[in-house]
Image (cartoon, grey):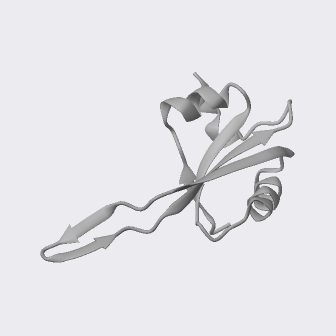
Amino acid sequence: MDGIKYAVFTEKSLRLLGKNQYTFNVESGFTKTEIKHWVELFFGVKVVAVNSHRLPGKGRRIGPILGHTMHYRRMIITLQPGYSIPLLEPYLL
């Protein structure tokens, strides 16, 4: 449950909501099967597919010191027809 950071609401992710696909940012150490299992347990839905890609961290400068933020993973979760995640339903409009 701690692995999912938040749901993503970009133009593409809002378009994918119409196809019963939900987008989440998750910790980079979690695998597709772990996220699939967690989503099925927590939301009570059936997951058909999980697609993911790793997003790079951003560079940061604090005075003379160069650094970067942590990278994270974005998961696109496809649900079986007839299932939905009710917390995200208002964004379909």
Q: Could you tell me which residue is drawn at 62 percent across and 44 percent down?
A: 23
The image quadrant where one finds the N terminus is: bottom right
**Relative horizontal placement of residue 53, taking residue 67 as reference (left or right):** right
Residue 52: x percent and y percent?
A: 66, 51
Q: Is residue 73 above or below residue 81?
A: below
Direction left: furthest residue: 63
**Relative horizontal placement of residue 82, taking residue 76 as reference (left or right):** right
Q: Is residue 70 above or below residue 45?
A: below
Residue 8: x percent and y percent?
A: 53, 44
Residue 3: x percent and y percent?
A: 63, 66
Q: Could you tell me which residue is drawn at 83 percent across and 36 percent down?
A: 83
Q: Could you tell me which residue is drawn at 49 percent across and 36 percent down?
A: 10
Residue 22: x percent and y percent?
A: 67, 40
Q: Is residue 82 above or below residue 63?
A: above
Q: Could you tell me which residue is drawn at 49 percent across and 30 percent down?
A: 11
**Relative horizontal placement of residue 68, taking residue 79 as reference (left or right):** left
Image quadrant in which you'd find residue 16: top right
**Relative horizontal placement of residue 4, taking residue 81 as reference (left or right):** left
The image quadrant where one finds the C terminus is: top right
Image quadrant in which you'd find residue 42: bottom right
Image quadrant in which you'd find residue 6: bottom right
Q: Nearer the viewer, residue 30 or 80?
A: 30
Direction top: furthest residue: 93
